[in-house]
Image (cartoon, rainbow, N blue to C red):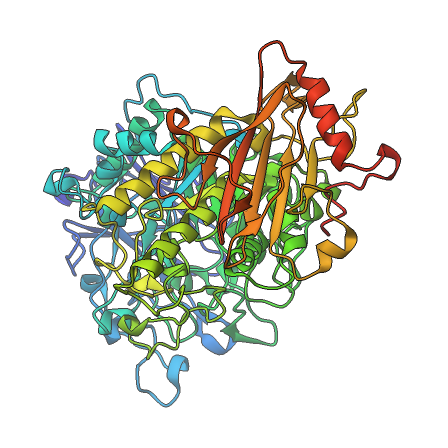
Amino acid sequence: MNSEEIDDTLSSGRPYPLGATWSKRGTNFAIFSANATRMELCLFDKPGDGQAVKTIRMFHCSNQIWHVFVPGLKPGQCYGYRAHGPFDPAKGFRFNPAKLLVDPYSKAICGDIRWGPEMFSYVMGDPQADLSKDDRDNAAQTFKSVVVDTTFDWGQDERPDTPMAQTIIYETHVKGFSKLWKELPDNLRGTYLGLGSQKAIEYFKSLGVTAVELLPVHHRADSQYLNDKGLSDYWGYNSIGFFAPDSRLASKDCLGEQVIEFKTMVKNLHAAGIEVILDVVYNHTSEGNQLGPTLCFRGLDNTTYYRTVADAPRYYMDYTGTGNTLAVYLPNPLQMVMDSLRYWITEMHVDGFRFDLAATLARELYDVNQLSSFFDVIHQDPVISQVKLIAEPWDLGQNGYLVGKFPVLWSEWNGKYRDAVRKFWKGDEGAMSELANRLSGSADLYQATGKTPTASINFITAHDGYTLADLVSYQETHNEANGENNKDGEKNNLSWNCGAEGPTENPDIQKLRRRQQRNFLTTLFLSQGIPMLAGGDEYGRTQQGNNNAYCQDNEISWLNWERDENAQRLTAFVSKLTAFRKEHPVFRRLEFFRGRPLRDTNIHDVAWLNSMGQRMSDEEWGAYNRCLMVFLSGFLIDLNGKVVEDDSFLLCLNAHFEAVPFKLPTTNPAATWEYVLNTAHEDGFVDQNNVQKIADSIEGRSLTVFRLAFKANADHSAVVKELLEHINPPPATAQSAETKPT
């Protein structure tokens, strides 16, 4: 857009909505700053221009919102702001009009940062550090905001609105998912359109996932630290634009096209019944600590947008490990976050959010507060409260680990689930009791607050940490590619390499590693709660032992689509697991197990057994025990008020290194145990046309599933009742599944 076409007849415009809002008459600009003394709107012809073709002083300020209407200005226009005000870093004020600022409400951001001393408001190398002032202009080296036409033909788009209990999440990165996929055209690989392509949709449908959870897509700024090392902030946890989809993930020039491509991706996925969940980072920005660059918030109103130290506002409170923390407990930053969430729901049609370091957002002054304004506003909002809300329930501040403590409406990444399952299959001592809690939906964490098993997002691996294949192949981190001498990344990974560190030609170790992956995956998909699969784990993706690949925008992180026979077999196994879970509501209950007779029957919903088929004793729960049988009754399952009947199953878990005798509970002659799945087999699921004889032992480090199969005309409830009478104590002394494992 040539700025010379703009009508010079300006008007005051409106203070709302914030951001740049285009209409057929022109564009309204509105931006908040409580402490600025003057605001200038700068218009540029191209993203890399250093000289504005027009600078407009904004004379009108209503309730701390500066605004102006520019007639004739059209979508595609590049712009930025210069904010005047006090430069007194010791008091927290960092206004510097030499630094061009992006609009916090930008719907699109263009251009790149070219790092140099001009990007900082202080003179680098000056003895006074950030107390000094740099007056060099940085317009040619920084981002520009873009005026966007938000209209889009959504057609008949409808949200899949998948019930939470039926949700299966696939966590992935927009670029990493398809960057190496040769079946896609070159220009679509690694883009929104690639992830929303028909090929990708066919893949998601074959896997059986119902939602894709995307690593951050808000526009980000790569740090100079990584840039100088030839790396980038690949994961994207370095947001600078909370309304703008990252232009790097679009296939075309990015003067608003990224918005269209993102919407197209969502529309295509919705048409296939697949939801889109965004990983969002509202706890900090890419401006870092007091020595970081000035890109947006710092130059607009530092003391309003950020949490500064009360008695030393030169410095920032840092609950995130990134140098700063957004002041979400204050009205204007809180409004910005809520406006952003509503925008992504109403304009971009996304179906939910996973909140990075969500504990930070709930901190009022210092402590995490379940009654914080953040929760209050979300819970009463008629739009935001109706989508999927998932918390990463921890941050780096004091008392910041809050698994099980978020309020209703929220699900949580259950880090305790991850650790318990890893410990059990690793063979750790004393892991049995907690494993039982995690398998049964973590009632010990969620039931007391009125939640259901859907509060628990179960996962074995995620983007942060080892991949599943690396979890069973490495005991030490191998993060040398990150350039930090392998000192970064979590060191307590609860991993086991199965006898060799990294790649090996030993066929026995290779076989054991494949079995362990099947153990983890089977446990994940047959647990109560919501399973989340890390993208690539379905075929055994490796990062060569790097458990902190946040900066690896390359083959270390990207999915490999050239897959050998073992990778294809594992993918087929995952597809069968998701189909099996969907077929059987016994694995996705809406209520926690009671562990006692249901209604007017003597049928229990769950029974915890030892390897001899008898109820676990108190001593066995606490002993050095690596074997467990779980009977899951398919009777009287409540699905949103509708009572259904499903098959009953027996899960046999053996984490010993060798085979252990297992005695299946005795059944009435009218029923028998039918082989369904055995992780000791390479294909996992048993071919019912060639069912092997049920062995009298369960192989070492394996999980076997049996279905209770009835003969014709059998009384199902009578058979189950009789079976349970042999293994359960009288109802008066029965102990619940929730309390016993705990």
Choose between 60 and 204: the one closer to the eye. 204
Res. 209 visible in picture: no
Q: Residue at x 64, y 35 (%)?
A: 631
Choose between 37 and 114: the one closer to the eye. 114
Measuring from the top left, give residue 438's x and y in whole percent. 61, 47
How many labels, in total?
0
Measuring from the top left, give residue 411's x and y in whole percent. 57, 42
In this rendering, the answer to whether 99 lies above or below 649 is: below
Q: Residue furthest top?
A: 713
Quadrant hosting residue 641:
top right
| Horizontal relation, residue 497 to residue 456: left or right | left
Q: Residue at x 20, y 64 (%)?
A: 141
Q: Residue furthest bottom?
A: 127
Measuring from the top left, give residue 407's x and y in whole percent. 66, 44
Q: Residue at x 23, y 74 (%)?
A: 228
Choose between 524 and 85: the one closer to the eye. 524
Q: Which quadrant holds the N terminus?
A: top left
Res. 715 visible in picture: yes
Measuring from the top left, give residue 22's x and y in whole percent. 30, 34
Q: Residue furthest right?
A: 732
| Horizontal relation, residue 116 to residue 92: left or right | left
| Horizontal relation, residue 559 to residue 169: left or right | left
In this rendering, the answer to whether 202 lies above or below 283 is: above
